[in-house]
Amino acid sequence: MALNHKLVLEAPQEIPDGAGGCLRSWGALGTLWGKVEPRSARLGLGEVGAISSSGFTVWVRGAPVGQSNRPAPGQRFVMQGRVLRIEAVTEEEPRGLYLRCSCNEEVSA
């Protein structure tokens, strides 16, 4: 499997805003190499207009549960300015050499 796309794995971080709430930002966990394939796409309506939603399958090298280089739902990949939200992660095969990540990208149309 050719892992030829450079992906930055990011996790959400909540920072107290000093007024009892918090601000959400994203922090990089590291760089992974992966294979990225499109799945499906659709056009929908958002609060401010049309939204293009595209699904992707991303394969990366396997890592044990709990390690910082193992993607998890709620995290995201950033690839050349594009943001792919990770929705699900599963082992590609029984030995866990590769992980299959179901991702979604939404952009204004």
Image (cartoon, helix red, strand yellow):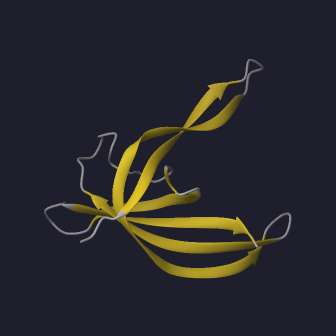
Answer with the quarter of the image where residue 89 lies.
Answer: bottom left
Q: Is residue 29 left or right of residue 19?
A: left
Question: Farthest residue toward the right?
Answer: 48
The relative height of residue 81 versus residue 92 in the rendered view (above or below) is: above
Answer with the quarter of the image where residue 30 lies.
Answer: top left
Residue 84, x across and y down, in percent:
53, 60
Residue 65, x across and y down, in percent:
27, 46
Question: Farthest residue toward the left?
Answer: 95
Q: Residue at x 51, y 51 (%)?
A: 74
Nearer to me, 1 or 42:
1
Residue 32, x across and y down, in percent:
35, 51
The relative height of residue 94 versus residue 20 in the rendered view (above or below) is: below
Report the number of numbered marks.
0
The relative height of residue 61 versus residue 58 in the rendered view (above or below) is: above
Q: Residue at x 86, y 64 (%)?
A: 48
Q: Is residue 2 left or right of residue 7?
A: left
Nearer to me, 33 or 91:
33
Q: Residue at x 84, y 64 (%)?
A: 47
Residue 71, x across and y down, in percent:
38, 51
Quadrant in which the N terminus is drawn: bottom left
Quadrant in which the C terminus is drawn: bottom right
Nearer to me, 18 or 8:
8
Nearer to me, 53 or 35:
35
